[in-house]
Amino acid sequence: MDQSEFLFQILLPLLMEGFAVTIKLIVLTAPFGLILGILVAVGRVYGSKPISLLCKGAVGFIKGTPLLLMLFILYFGLPSVGITLSAFVASLVGFIMCNGAYNSEYIRGAISSVKEDQMIAAQALGMTRMQAVRHIILPQALIRSIPGLSNEFIYLIKYSSLAYMLTVIELTGAGKMVATKYFEFTEVFMIVGMGYLLLVTITTIAVMLIERKVAVPGMTQSGRNMLDIL
Amino acid sequence: MKNNETILRVENIHKSFGDLEVLKGVSFDVKRGETICFIGPSGTGKSTLLRCINLLTQPDQGSVWLGDAEVTNSGKSINHFRQRIGMVFQNFFLFDHLTAVRNVEVALIKVRGMKPKEAREKALDELRQVGMEEWAEHYPAELSGGQAQRVSIARALAMNPDVILFDEPTSALDPELTREVLEVMKKLALAGMTMLVVTHEMGFACSVANRIMFMEHGEIKEQGSPEELMNDTKFERCRNFIGQFDQINGD
């Protein structure tokens, strides 16, 4: 069997299957992770004391324990209390919790960077606190948290490989299987690595485009300069 | 709409911050269409008084009435009162992430539930009122202070408030920008808008106000029409306060 036959007929088809699973994990995690992050951040900053403490505690717990441990609990531990999740769903739940917890920290930081006067002006117009948060504070905070959130998204791309530890055959897992079967470790894992690199590169470019699109003069560095207009 | 109707009544407002008693029982009535200027030294509670009217600051004691309804102790319906009591701030407080026109329309859409198209028309109308229509698509950071303040006046006007509170609207502006804002305010006053203005612009106070309230140490010390305050001997303290400005100005 020559190299190109191995590459195109065995390795790439298998890796593509894994790649599809990896993308599925990421695409399903990211939106829920973002929503969770927003809810937790708002809960921490604007929630009542118990809610704020709950959010703080949950984030502290997730930040303080290895994600792999969390995945083991979700997949191997929960059946003992009667909750059985498939490996894929358990991974998804773990990733969303992890992604949400870290996202909430970036968003919380961005919320506290929004000046208090924005809330006062919104309330003076008759907005409730929650309306002000939703329509005035959060849009500004989210624009400012794009760099942090995109960083977290990139982490997600890479730690999605932990799903392999729960028997989900995603990109890394697929690579591992081919590599052990054919004893082609270096070549296989380099190609696997290029798969991740590709995803991260696409993300980085996409984030640049998004940042440019949502840039607001005076709020972000990349905003139009006052001089351009005059 | 009766002309002499009392639109706003403030009764015996007290407010302390810690040990510092900022307002020591302030009461006054405002008739529809009146412009009242609050003048006096810094730190005498003028801005706090305005914020107590729409409960951005909660007064310790006393009540505020808008028409026949009590604003203080209104619980959740404070937001309805705040829609009817516009406010313009010293540092404009425009929403940084929204263009001028969206600053004006956002509360119409999100609070009033107006359709976006209708709200846009109304917002552009209000911007036209303050001469800022051409700048509708610009962000706050792209506006001069005077322009930003005019947008914030348009934002308050868009809610069709019964009364607008101006909290030192020109104190952050240079004289030229101050003039463009004062001109807008003067136009509003002449058009019959009810306005409470905390200001250090004595010229504006004297020429536009129906009544001037001179505040000191948390109380309204002297009040009257501009003519009374300038000419009547019993208003000595206020005249001295205004006189200081004249001496510096040299006239």
Image (cartoon, coloured by chain):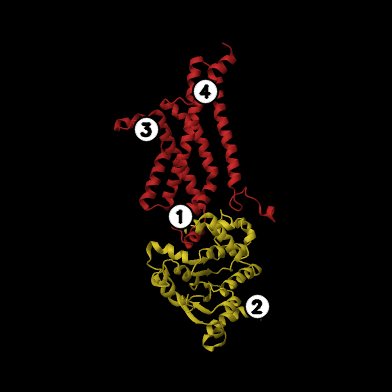
Label 1 to label 2: alpha-carbon separation: 46 Å
Callout 3 and callout 4 share a chain = yes
Q: Chain of mark 2?
A: B
Q: Which residue is disc 4 drawn over?
A: A15
Q: Which residue is disc 1 drawn over?
A: A131
Q: Residues within 10 Å of mark 2 (few under 14, many from 20)?
A: few
Q: Vertically, is A152 above or below A141?
A: above
Q: Vertically, is B73 above or below B29?
A: above
Tag shown at residue A139: none
| Nearer to me, B76 or B110 | B110
Callout 4 and callout 2 share a chain = no
Where is residue B45 shown, x and y percent of the image? 48, 72
Disc 4 marks a residue whose amino acid type is Leu
Q: Can you tell which of label 1 and label 4 is closer to the viewer? A: 1
Disc 2 marks a residue whose amino acid type is Asn
Q: Chain of mark 4?
A: A
Label 3 to label 4: alpha-carbon separation: 26 Å
Disc 1 marks a residue whose amino acid type is Gln
Q: Which residue is disc 2 drawn over?
A: B249
Residue appearing at x 41%, y 66% in the figure:
B58
**Residue lying at the far left of the rendered structure:** A81
Q: Can you tell which of label 1 and label 2 is closer to the viewer? A: 1
Q: Vertically, is B119 above or below B8?
A: above
Q: Is residue B56 visible in this depiction of the protein?
A: no
**Residue lying at the far bottom of the rendered structure:** B233
Disc 3 marks a residue whose amino acid type is Leu
Colour displayed for chain A in the image of the structure: red
Label 3 to label 1: alpha-carbon separation: 36 Å
